[in-house]
Image: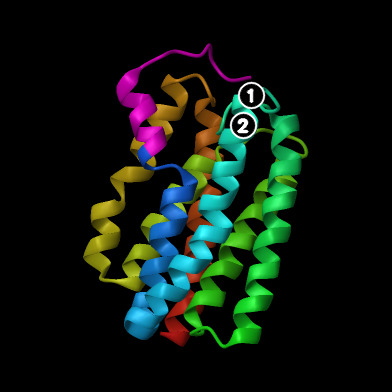
C-alpha cells in the first residue's frame, strides 16, 4: 500500500512535467524527426495527440466528473480499463501508421508504447506499479538512441526524480517505483535495439 498522500508542490510539479503523456509526446515526435525530419516529426505529433494527449484530456474530464479519482488514476482497479482502452487505441494507431506509410521508426515507437501499456496492464492485475517511473525510465534510455548517448546520460536523473516525487506524494511505495523503473529500462533497451535498425 502506498504511503499517505501529501501536497508537496515540487513533487507534484515533477509528476506533472514528467508524466507519461508529455514524455510519450516528446519521444514519438523525436523518433519521427530522427527517422524522417519534419515529415516524420509531424507523423510523431499526430500519433502523440491520439495516443497520449487525447487519453489525458479524457481522464481529466472524467476526474472532474468524479468518474475516476484523479487524472493520474491512483486506484489500481480504475487503472485496468484505462490501460485497456488506451492500449486498444494505440494498437489501432499502429495499424493506421503501417497502412498509411508512416516512417518506420514511428510505428516502431508506437508499438513499444503499446508494449509498455500491455506490460503495465498485466502487472496491474495483481499489483499497483508506477507508470510514471516506467515511462520516465524508458524515455531516458530511448533518448540515447534517438539523439546522442550524452542525452540519455543527461536524462538519467529524471526517473529517479520522478520516483522520489511519486513516493513523496503518497501515490506509490518505493518498491512500486523500483519495479516501474525496471520495466521501463527493459522496454527502453528493447526499443533501442529495434529502433536502431530502422533509423
- Mark 1 sits on what residue? 69
Residue appearing at x 63%, y 61% in the figure: 114
Quadrant holding the N terminus: top right
Q: Secondary structure at mark 2?
A: loop
Residue 12 in the image, given as x and y percentages of width and height: 39, 26
Give the spatial CA distance, label 1 vs label 2: 6 Å
Image label count: 2
Residue appearing at x 54%, y 15% in the figure: 3
On whether residue 93 falls in the magenta region, the answer is no
Quadrant holding the C terminus: bottom left
In-front residue for pair 100/12: 100
On whether residue 15 falls in the magenta region, the answer is yes
Q: Badges 1 and 2: C-beta atoms under 8 Å apart?
A: yes
11 sits left or right of 64 in the view: left
Q: Is residue 96 above or below residue 28?
A: below
Residue 135 in the image, given as x and y percentages of width and height: 49, 50
- Mark 2 sits on what residue? 73
Mark seen at residue 79:
none
Residue 57 in the image, given as x and y percentages of width and height: 55, 43
Residues drawn in magenta: 1-16
151 sits left or right of 64 in the view: left
Q: Is residue 192 above or below residue 178?
A: below
Quarter of the image for residue 58 reads: top right
The answer to whether residue 192 is visible is: no
In-front residue for pair 149/101: 101
Q: Residues within 10 Å of mark 1 (few under 14, many from 20)?
A: some
Q: Secondary structure at mark 1?
A: loop
Amino acid at each position: 500500500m502506498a504511503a499517505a498522500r501529501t501536497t508537496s508542490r515540487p513533487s507534484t510539479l515533477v509528476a506533472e512535467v514528467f508524466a507519461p503523456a508529455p514524455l510519450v509526446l516528446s519521444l514519438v515526435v523525436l523518433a519521427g524527426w530522427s527517422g524522417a525530419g519534419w515529415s516524420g516529426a509531424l507523423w510523431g505529433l499526430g500519433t502523440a495527440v491520439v495516443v497520449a494527449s487525447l487519453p489525458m484530456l479524457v481522464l481529466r474530464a472524467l476526474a472532474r466528473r468524479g468518474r475516476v479519482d484523479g487524472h493520474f488514476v491512483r486506484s489500481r482497479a480504475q487503472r485496468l480499463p484505462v490501460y485497456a482502452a488506451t492500449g486498444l487505441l494505440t494498437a489501432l494507431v499502429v495499424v493506421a501508421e503501417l497502412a498509411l506509410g508512416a516512417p518506420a521508426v514511428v510505428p516502431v515507437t508506437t508499438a513499444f508504447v503499446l508494449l509498455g501499456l500491455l506490460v503495465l496492464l498485466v502487472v496491474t492485475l495483481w499489483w499497483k506499479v508506477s507508470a510514471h517511473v516506467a515511462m520516465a525510465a524508458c524515455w531516458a534510455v530511448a533518448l540515447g538512441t534517438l539523439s546522442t548517448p550524452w542525452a540519455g546520460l543527461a536524462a538519467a536523473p529524471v526517473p529517479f526524480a520522478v520516483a522520489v516525487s511519486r513516493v513523496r506524494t503518497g501515490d506509490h511505495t518505493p518498491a512500486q517505483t523500483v519495479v516501474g523503473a525496471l520495466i521501463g529500462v527493459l522496454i527502453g533497451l528493447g526499443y533501442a535495439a529495434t529502433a536502431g535498425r530502422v533509423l
